Image: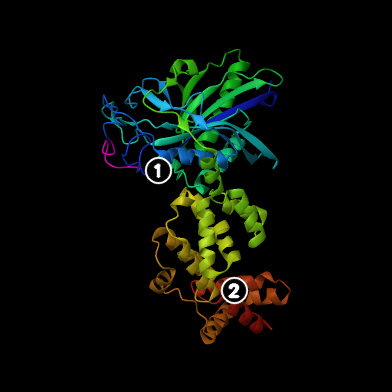
Amino acid sequence: MSRKDYEIVIGLEVHAELSTKTKIFCSCPTQFGGEPNTHTCPICMAMPGTLPVLNEKVVEYAVKAGLATNCQISNNSKNDRKNYFYPDLPKSYQISQFDKPLCEHGYIEIEDENGNEKKIRLLRIHIEEDAGKLNHDDFTGESLVDLNRAGVPLIEMVSEPDLRSSYEVEQYLRKLKSILEYIEVSDCKMQEGSLRADVNVSVHKKDEPFGTRTEMKNMNSFRSITRAIEYEVERQIDLIEYGGKVEQETLRWDDVSGKTFSMRDKEDAQDYRYFPDPDLVAIKLSKEYIENIKQNLPELPESRKQRYLEEYKLSPKDAKIITSSKYLSDLFEGAIKICNNPKAVNNWIISDISRILNEMEIEPIEIPFDAKQLGKLVLLIDKGTISSSIGKKVLEELFKNPKDPEQIVKENGWVQISDEGAIKEVVEKILQNNPQSIADYKAGKDRALGFLVGQAMKETKGKANPQMLNQMFKESLK
């Protein structure tokens, strides 16, 4: 049988670190980094006799996430102990939620490969504490425990097994990431582990029951997740085709070899021996509390996209790209306030800024310059101070060393040449050196004009006013 005879079934458990100032059950800071074990206290280090106190902001942020993803919010939920041993889990249990999560039965809409709308159901969103981190020393073979991350608040967003391809998974994750950014409950910095996913994959022959799933843990890169799914699907299909059996297990994805490796058998819920945490009271939420959060939700990606279509007349494609990231969207709106040129700002973000982000393999949150600097760059071009080609150089500098664009232009001597005498001198020189292009233009080959203008821009290192160049070449060629 071919791969087309199999259906792929994927479900995700996405963990997002919440952007609270303090941890979920103590007052230790949540900032990323810091010397090992400096953001800790007896509570998050699980010293005997310590008692947790729930951070109210964690509940608020979880409810926000639930409302933004169309979930039902529970008026009555609780915290449970999830028991398992792991070296970086100080208590040997994790405080999480089991049968009474804060949010249930939501959904997110994505586009599949054919551009059709598809609804991906969310089973639940619950709060829990993060574990610490093991730092492995490859030279000595030893591992050290850093508990700075222990107790950092998480929401876990569990999807139903509605995803059918790695493409749909990426669309779902990007949409979910965007929503969390917009409601400002997580910075979603995947490179720092603020957003990571456990990926459950199974395959089965069409019209047969779902197959046995495997789980790939703690993945924090869109590219790695896509590659891992594609590999695991092929591995499972090959196993079945050759008479083998897929085992329910937890896998580790190795990005270098491009393969999955077994870590341990996958536990079922009963293996965790859940029971209500006796040190924490139940979470009771009034209808007024939930409604107040709902009324104060920020503008979400879909409504902002619609507004851009109507207010700024962006194309659906451009509006989708810009609003896919809150950071790109905020950059767009902030720059417009400076230069009042939505079309130009849109073009810079869609083309050059997106290209550089891809080349540098960084996320929009890592853009080093602000909206004011981008707006000033557009203003310099609109005023004729610099040409568009010089604008590209200024943008490159903004990514390397962000500062006032006017200062960049002055320091590099990039002010546009708009002096008629200077430009005429360049035009005459280019015409003198390119008689064949003159003949081509007079023979009706309009591309020759573009070539001549390009030569002049090269001669002036991109500083000549392109409109003046075009006009003077046309007049001279008559």
The magenta region covers: 32-40
Q: Mark 2 highlights which residue?
A: 453
Q: Mark 1 highlights which residue?
A: 20
Q: Position of residue 476 (x, y in %)?
A: 64, 84
Residue 34 within the magenta-colored segment of the rendering: yes
Is residue 158 shown to the viewer in this render? Answer: no
Q: Crowding near pointer 1: few (<14 within 10 Å), some, many (20+)?
A: some
Q: Position of residue 443 (x, y in %)?
A: 73, 75
Q: Quadrant of residue 7?
A: top right
The C terminus lies in quadrant? bottom right
Select label 2 or label 1 by which is in front. Answer: 1
Q: Is residue 369 left or right of residue 149?
A: right
Q: Position of residue 317 (x, y in %)?
A: 65, 53
Residue 407 within the magenta-colored segment of the rendering: no
Q: Is residue 32 left or right of residue 234?
A: left
Q: Is residue 166 above or below residue 180?
A: above
Q: Is residue 272 above or below residue 296?
A: above
Residue type at numbered disc 2? Val
Q: State the residue at coordinates (61%, 16%).
A: 240
